[in-house]
Amino acid sequence: MYRYDEFDSKLVNERVEQFRRQTERRIKGELQEEQFRPLRLMNGLYLQLHAYMLRINVPYGVLSARQMRQLAHVARTYDKGYGHFTTRQNIQYNWIQLKDVPDALADLAEVEMHGIQSSGNCIRNTTSDQYAGVARDEIEDPRVYCEIIRQWSTLHPEFSFLPRKFKIAVTGSPNDRAAVKVHDIGLRMHRNDAGEAGFEVIVGGGQGRTPFIGKTIREWLPPEHLLSYLEAILRVYNFDGRRDNKYKARIKILVHQVGADEFRRRVDEEWEHIKDSALKLPQAEIDRINAYFAPHDYEPLQDHSAALAEQGKANTEFAAWLKANVANHKVQGYAIVNISLKSLRQPPGDMTAAQMDATADLADAYSYGELRVNHRQNLVLPDVRQSDLFELWQKLASIDLATPNIGHVSDIIACPGLDYCALANARSIPIAQEINARFQSMDRVHEIGELTINISGCMNACGHHHVGHIGILGVDKKGQEFYQFTLGGSSDQNASLGDRTGPGFPADQAVDAVETILNTYVKIRNEGERFLDTYRRVGMSPFKEALYGPA
Amino acid sequence: MALLKNGKPVTDVFLDVSTAETIPSEGAIIVSLDQWQNSAAQLRARKEPLGIVLRSHEKPAAIAEDVHKFAVIALDFPAFGDGRAYSSARLLRERYKYQGELRAVGDVLLEQLHFMNRVGFDAFELASEDAARDWQIAASDISVWYQPTSDGRPHALRLRHQAAGDN
């Protein structure tokens, strides 16, 4: 993985000291909240319903064991002993005190982490495929370009005061695990007719109040022009994006209003001026960053699947975990292990300090000391020997991290909701936990099959409800929490936005509604057909009828 | 209100008449884009130095051919979060090769100076009581930059590859 050199370290350390001075001025009363607000936001510090919240970037979801231990230390020392992994591959601490924030940031800087640009109207943490570097379907490792974008976007002098926040996602694989079509900019690597790898550039996707699937404005961009092209897009957006209404300020609204063709024209016009400027990436720079992501020194191993099948026969829980949580690795004899943070006993994405420490130890013992965070609020051990899987599974199970539900009904994305968030209209976490409790039979979970349920506690859609196979949106109706349902959303390479079923349900009927939808699906599905595919085949009416009665 | 140029307090010799109804016949003045476009001939004929202020929605392309006529170009920040002038500043310096004073006016925050510094501003109108001291702090808070801009300061990419001996 990438390691800071003297320049990266210096920047982050200077930033910590700068924020320490600003925080001291705030505590002494020299700065008022109004003046302090933009400063703290630039460092990832929010003021939430009950307390400050500190959001720390996990660049493109890559985390070392050493960093994970430091995250545990911060949780234990400055928070209530846990942290919350988010859909943007970041971690949030929900109970931090202002006076402790500079120390926490200094501790994190020691392990090359920070909260710079995890908030504010700037370019946020670039996100990527949690299987980057180990996926079988990968064309090139997207982390190389994510790191190049990370550096280019950090404290960018021109783009730190954009109309609104700005999110970039990169996938190096045709199977999109990074949801690139619902980002401000999505980059999808593919090969052109000459066999060279480059990027399809997708702009103006997003969720929130006005969801859009992104539009392709360039079919194939050579990697050497990546930064100049991004700079051209950002400059057009910085000038032309709306600033009169915060709900219409994201780039998706601009792209929608002027149209993809006109937006492309503006970008190309700008790009012509700068494409051969100092932003043109020298091959030496791409090579330099690429070297940080060189493959591990994998052992020549035999495929171990026959033995795993035997172990699975003897232990059905292990077999269920193997099936749901373990993915193919590009190297024979290795496997990718997903760690579910969706056990019944914790809110989605939450992890205790003890679990973080234990997971760091497991990463050291079984996965070259490396972990990943994915946008579905789970973790990944990317490089596990197949022959270690059984032992690893036992150890994960002993710390409640082996729930075999990745990509299934109880693997729910949920925003923090009204339990924490100042913007929320309704709670998300309790609904997620009730669904999880209702679907405790793993036989039933696996019988339902591949499914994503995404829950947001307000229309800002942090819980990605628009792109859940089943989306749940919490709203406030005369002081009561109601939950509206959408069906048919997806954030993969065939991204789509879900359709509303109809009126919402009160909190005590929301889980029944999920059950009704799933029972209907099981009744009408074809052999081996996923929920999403059934919905796309039959449409809304059978589900509507089951939920609301005959029309 | 203090005017800093290259980090030092200076006296502002320009009179901002951009919102005035009539333009005085003498003296160094700063006019609006409208005034410039409506009275370019008269303004060009003046002996004294001329400045122009661009509001954040006014793109510098509008004065691309004329930048050398101005001793000062002021870019207005109606609110600190309105970042359009950062792009305007870079275009003026990098594309239109403007060499004169580039002044940040309006809601200019201390914490933004290091960004402004990088995109080509060299003069700042600050409300701060001790602007020169504040400027020194703000300008030296962060010493590492990843992005190449026209201000000539070394950026990390160049420093790294110089150190490595390649280019």
Image (cartoon, coloured by chain):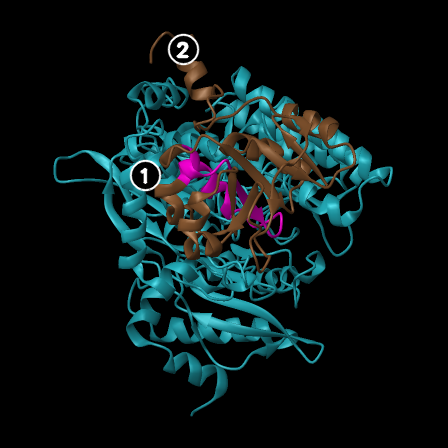
Q: Quadrant of residue A535?
A: bottom left
The stretch of residues the image draws in magenta is: B67-93
Q: Position of residue B25 (x, y in %)?
A: 55, 49
Specify the subunit that label 1 lies on: A
Q: Is B81 one of the magenta-colored residues?
A: yes
Q: Which residue corresponds to mark 1?
A: A172
Q: Which residue is mark 2?
A: B162
Determine the colour of chain B: brown
A388 in relation to A436, above or below: above
- What is the secondary structure assignment of the residue under circle 1? loop
- Please tell me which residue lies in front, A63 or B95: B95
Q: Nearer the viewer, mark 2 or mark 1?
A: 2
Residue A362: x %, y % from top left: 56, 28
Residue found at x 57% / y 44%: B26
Q: Is residue A349 visible?
A: yes
On the rendered image, what quadrant is the C terminus of chain A found in? bottom left
- Residue A111, compared with residue A415, is above or below; it is above
Residue A483 versus residue A98 in the image, above or below: below
- CA distance for labels 2 and 1: 30 Å
Q: Nearer the viewer, residue A291 or B79?
A: B79
Residue B48 located left or right of residue A538: right
Residue at point 71%, 47% (across, down)? A37
Chain coloured cyan here: A
Magenta span includes A273: no
